[in-house]
Image: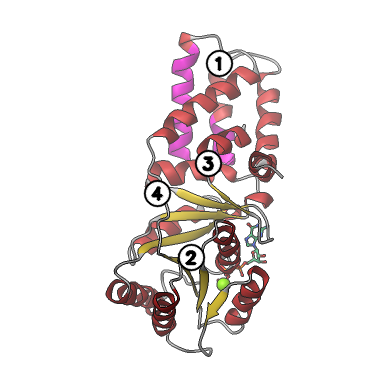
Amino acid sequence: MGLFKKIGQALSKTREAFARRIDAMLSHGQLDDDFYDDLTDLLISCDIGVRTSMEIVDELRVQARKEKIRTSEDVKNALKRILTEEFSSLPKIEIEYPAIITIIGVNGVGKTTTIGKLAQYFKNQKKEVSLVAGDTFRAAAADQLTQWAERTKTRIIKQTEGADAAAVVFDGITSAKAKGTDVLLVDTAGRLHTKTNLMEELKKIDKIITKNYPEANRYNLIVLDATTGQNALSQISAFNDFVKIDGIVLTKLDGTAKGGVVVPIEKEYHLPVVFIGTGEGKDDLELFDPAEFINGLF
Ligand SMILES: Nc1nc2c(ncn2[C@@H]2O[C@H](COP(=O)(O)OP(=O)(O)OP(=O)(O)O)[C@@H](O)[C@H]2O)c(=O)[nH]1
Ligand SMILES: [Mg+2]
C-alpha cells in the first residue's frame, strides 16, 4: 500500500467527520459569522486546539475577503493552504548514525509497539538495529520486547525484571560499540510525571548515554496516543521538565477522529512529529510528512 494511502486511510475518520460537517454547514448559507463559529468548533472537535483553531479561522476570514471562497471544496483548499503555510516553518529531525533513540511516555501509549515498528523501519533502511529492554519495571515488558525482536529479527539486550534501567542501557551501549550497531532503540517503562522516582530514572538514563556514548546521535522521542487528543499535549511539557524531548511519535491515528492534534503539537510546542503509528503491525509506522498529513486531513 502506498504511503499516502496509509496516512490517508489512518486519517479517514478525521477527514470524514470534517467533510460531513463542512458540507452541512454550507448547505444553506454562505461564509457568515455563524459559519466561522461553527468551523471553529469543528476544528476544535478534531483536536486542533482552541487557540490554533481560532487563528486558522481568522486567517480564513482574511483570505475570504480577498478571493472567492464559496463551496466546501473552496473552504477545504483554503484550510490546506493555511496549514501548509503554518507547517512550513517547523523544525525537522534527520536521524543520523550511530543513533540511540530513547522512547518515553505515559502508560499504554504504544512505546514498545513503536520500538518494534522502528526496528523494522531501520532494518528496511539496511541498518543494524538492537533493542534495549529498559522497561524493567513492568512484569513481562522484556518478554513483549523479545517478541518484537523475534518478529523483526533484531538483537535485544536485556536483564532480569527489577534491574536498574540505566544499567541495561549501559549494556546496550557496550554492545552497540562492540558490534558497530547503527541504531539502538531503548524501551522505557510507562510513567506519569508525578512519579518522581521514575522520572529521575529517565534522567539517569540520559546521563549514562552522555557519559558513555558521546559519539552517538541521540534522540528522546515521546510517544503520544492520538486518541487522547488534547491530554496528549500536557504530557509533552510534563516530560520536558525532566529530559529534553527532541520529537514526537503519534500513535493510534488509525483509530481516531482526533488526528488534528498534530497541529497544536507542532505549533505550540515547536517539536516535530517524526513518526506516526497507523496500526498494530510491524509495518504500521510512517515518517510524518506534513503535506501528506494535510491532504489526508481534509
Ligand atoms: N490501533 C493501534 N494500536 C496501537 C498502535 N500502537 C500501539 N497500539 C496498541 O496499543 C496497546 C499498547 O501498546 P504498548 O506498545 O504495549 O504500549 P506501551 O506504551 O509500551 O505500554 P506500557 O509499557 O505498559 O506503558 C497495544 O495493544 C498495541 O497493540 C497504533 O498505532 N495503532
Ligand atoms: Mg511498553
Q: Residues within 10 Å of mark 1 (few under 14, many from 20)?
A: few
Q: Secondary structure at mark 1?
A: loop
Q: Is residue 252 magenta?
A: no
Packing grade of label 2 (10 A; few <14, some 14-19, many >=20) is: many
Give the secondary structure at mark 4: loop
Say which mark, if any, is on residue 105.
Answer: 2
Give above or below for 261 relative to 180: above
* Amino acid bearing label 1: Asp
Return the residue at label 3: 289
Q: CA distance from mark 1 to mark 4?
A: 35 Å
- The image shows residue 13, relative to residue 230, as above or below, that is above
Instruction: Point out the frontmost of discs 2 and 1.
Output: 2
**Kind of residue at badge 3:** Asp
Q: Which residues are magenta?
A: 40-64
Task: Measuring from the top left, give residue 65's x and y in whole percent.
Answer: 47, 10
First in sequence: mark 2 vs mark 4: 2
Alpha carbon separation for disc pair 3 and 1: 33 Å
Disc 3 crowd, CA 10 A, few/some/many (<14, 14-19, 20+):
some
Mark 4: which amino acid?
A: Leu
> Mark 1 CB in 8 Å range of ligand 1?
no
Q: Where is 140 relative to 218, above or below?
A: below
Q: Is mark 2 within 8 Å of ligand 1?
A: yes
Within the magenta stretch, is there residue 44?
Answer: yes
| Residue that badge 4 annotates | 271
